[in-house]
Amino acid sequence: MSFAAEGLTKRYPGKDGMHTVFEQLSFSLPDGAFLVVLGRSGVGKSTLLRVLAGIEKADAGEVLLDGAPRAGAGRDVFFIFQDFNQLFPWMTLEQNLTYALRRAKLPESTARAREALGQVDLLDAAGKYPRALSGGMKQRGALARALALRSRVLLLDEPFSSLDPITRRQCGETLLRLWRARDFTAVFVTHDIGEALSLGTGIAVLGRAGLSFFDPSAPGLAEDLENALGDGGEKPEYFD
Amino acid sequence: MKRGTAQFLWVLVLLLIWEAAARFSGVSPLLLPTVEATVASLFDALFHGTLFYQALFSIGIIALGLFIGVALALVLALLAVQSRLADSLVGTLTALAHPLPGLAILPLLILWFGSGTGVILAIIVHSILWPVLLNLTAGLRQTPAMYLDIGHLLSLSKPRIAVELMLPCAVPDLLAGVQIGWSRGWRALISAEMVFGAVGRLGGVGWYLFKERTFMDAPGLFAGILLVICIGVLVEGVLFSRLERLLLTRFGREETK
């Protein structure tokens, strides 16, 4: 039981030929892992997540769930975006969840939606439209949608980076609490070393050479990560 | 002062100027009747004559035209965002037909189909369809890419993504398109009725205007114009502004990547 990538390669057409975002990238995460991927902005962290989610196609390689290659996107591997407005604004919070559940053909959509909203402390706001929610509430709502969908893997693309520091920490704690209580694998992308250290059971840095993994219990980890990030290379900014 | 109040006061000022001009300028009442004579004529035509039914006829036919035009625009726009082939076809059709005034095809339609309600309806649909389609396709294309990504994550089919995720995002543009379409359609209708003569049992407001001109009934003519203005103001100021408030609170746009 695992979430893995094998030989993933992604290229983009640029002004002077093809640019390689990452090449032959491989990793394997056991079920229930929490991997934080660090990288400087523009290094291709978002692209990596989008390819892992199946939203974008890889030029080579495969994404594997439980050993089987995934064909395209699906609710098993869900995405939490950085943008606050990922809930549909014309539906209430609860409708956002029940809509996703019905479309994913999951039964008992109302009960499941309310259960997930309860887990992120948003049951009181179930009937509110997203415009009436704060940034942190919206991101927790998006998290609840993925929880309700019983996604096996959550790909989180700097989901809390636009929040104020206190809300950001609270959201991080909520995520960790849910991760401990529930059975999902998380890949969390950030450019903030502090956030990475507070969240991950595994930490990797995405750079020119692909993913380099770090032992989270190693002494002097923060410094090592700083150094690794410093070597992030001079990739053009438009990759993210 | 509220905008509505200010507008109402301006209308009063204009009516006063009109009344003063009609009474004191020495212009023949055949060319410029008084407000009083016009309003009297309007009430007389509405409640003792046929104007009320003629207005109902015009409103009915424009409502039907709006319904058909918007339905066609919805089908074409939703097809266009799902297939490149449909997109290029719809784009070409819009580019060709949008600049063509409805009245320009009237002689051709008469030649082909004779005169009748169907031809007027065709002209109204033509006047409404293209601006609605243009606005709607532009609106559908403004759907945040993130919503399409979520659609893929939920394994939605293309038609579902178009109808359930893109269409709600395009509601403000659809509404703007319908407003443009309505005003074009309304103008086309009145013009077509004047050119056509009586369609149906009594004809519409346009035919009423034409008849009043023929009989040199200036108060009647002014009354007809007043009615056309009143219907226009009611539809735009009351119906559309209510609809806008109702829909935009729910479907208004948010700042999204």
Image (tube, grey):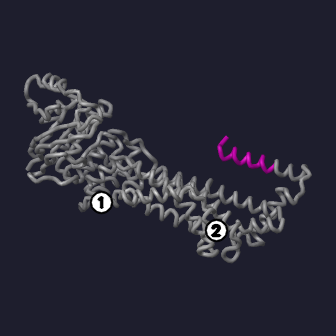
Foreground of the two, B248 or A38? A38
Helix, strand or loop status at disc 1: loop
Counting from the top left corner in percent of width and height, residue A89 is at 39, 49
Q: CA distance from mark 1 to mark 2?
A: 44 Å
The reply to whether the magenta stretch includes residue B85 is no
Residue shown at 34%/57% (left/top)?
Answer: B161
Q: Nearer the viewer, mark 1 or mark 2?
A: 2
Residue under numbered circle 2: B107
What is the magenta range?
Answer: B1-16
Q: Are marks 1 and 2 on the same chain?
A: yes
* Residue A198 location, quadrant: top left
Question: What's the magenta bit mostly, secondary-structure-wise?
Answer: helix
Counting from the top left corner in percent of width and height, residue B212 is at 79, 66
Residue shown at 55%/63% (left/top)?
Answer: B126
Foreground of the two, B36 or B113? B113
Rendered image: mark on residue A204: none
Q: How many marks?
A: 2
Helix, strand or loop status at disc 2: helix
Residue shown at 14%/35% (left/top)?
Answer: A210
Counting from the top left corner in percent of width and height, residue A208 is at 17, 31
Q: Residues within 10 Å of mark 1 (few under 14, many from 20)?
A: few
* Residue A102 location, quadrant: bottom left
In the shown orientation, is residue B108 left or right of residue B19?
left
Q: Chain of mark 2?
A: B
